[in-house]
Image (cartoon, helix red, strand yellow):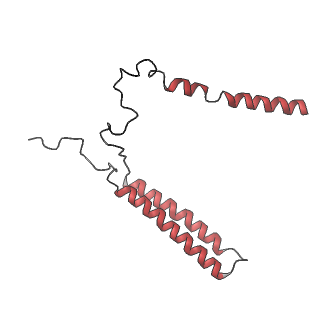
Amino acid sequence: MKTIFTLLFSMAMFSTTFAQYGQNGQRDRGKDNDVYASHDNRGHDRHDKNYGGYVFTPRERDMQITQINREYDYKIQSVKNKPYMGWFQKKRLINNLEAQRDEEIAQVIRKFRSPKNMFGDFRGKDRKKW
């Protein structure tokens, strides 16, 4: 039994050692020869046209807010169902959970209203055609 367990453990260790070998070898394949002559700006946001921009749609915003509400409603309901907790502790915990929920929703809204959000932004296209 010990031999089988040792064999399985060593095989698991051996397989996890080589689990990501191919990924690291493939990632930087084209960059090693032309480091100084290359004008590749892949790692720098300053040279990017959007400068760190992202697209965050209203549907994604609403889905995240719905998910946050669902999680906190579940947490609040579980606090309400605890039989051995006093009403003052329950009320304090529920108020803390509601404050956390409001803060997470505010973060999602700030992310949507951020100037880096490129949803509906047509700066890249030339509007002056005449």
Pick whichever, 10 or 119, lies toward us. 10
Q: Which residue lies furthest to the left in this view?
A: 130
Residue 96 higher or lower than 129, as above or below = below
State the quadrant of the N terminus: top right
Image quarter hosting the C terminus = top left
Which residue is at 56% across, 69% downward? 97
Residue most toward the bottom?
Answer: 87
Left or right: 116, with 73 as reference point: left
Q: Which residue lies furthest to the front in this view?
A: 36
Place of residue 99 in the rendered image (x, y in percent of width and height, measured from the top left): 51, 70
Query: Which quarter of the picture shows residue 114?
Result: bottom left
Furthest residue toward top:
33
In this view, the residue in front, 35 or 13, is: 35
Exactly how many numbered labels are in the figure?
0
Residue 87 position, x and y percent, is 65, 82
Question: Camera-side residue: 3 or 70?
Answer: 3
Name which residue lies at 16% across and 44% down. 127
Rendered location of residue 90, percent (x, y): 63, 77
- Quarter of the image for residue 77 reads bottom right
Judge from the rendering whether residue 92 lies leftward or rightward of residue 86; answer left or right: left
Looking at the image, which residue is at 31% across and 53% down? 115
Q: Could you say where residue 4 lies in the image, as x and y percent from the top left? A: 87, 30
In this rendering, the answer to whether 38 lies above or below 57 is above
Q: Is residue 129 above or below residue 93?
A: above
Q: Nearer the viewer, residue 32 or 113?
A: 32
Q: Which residue is drawn at 36% across and 47% down?
A: 55
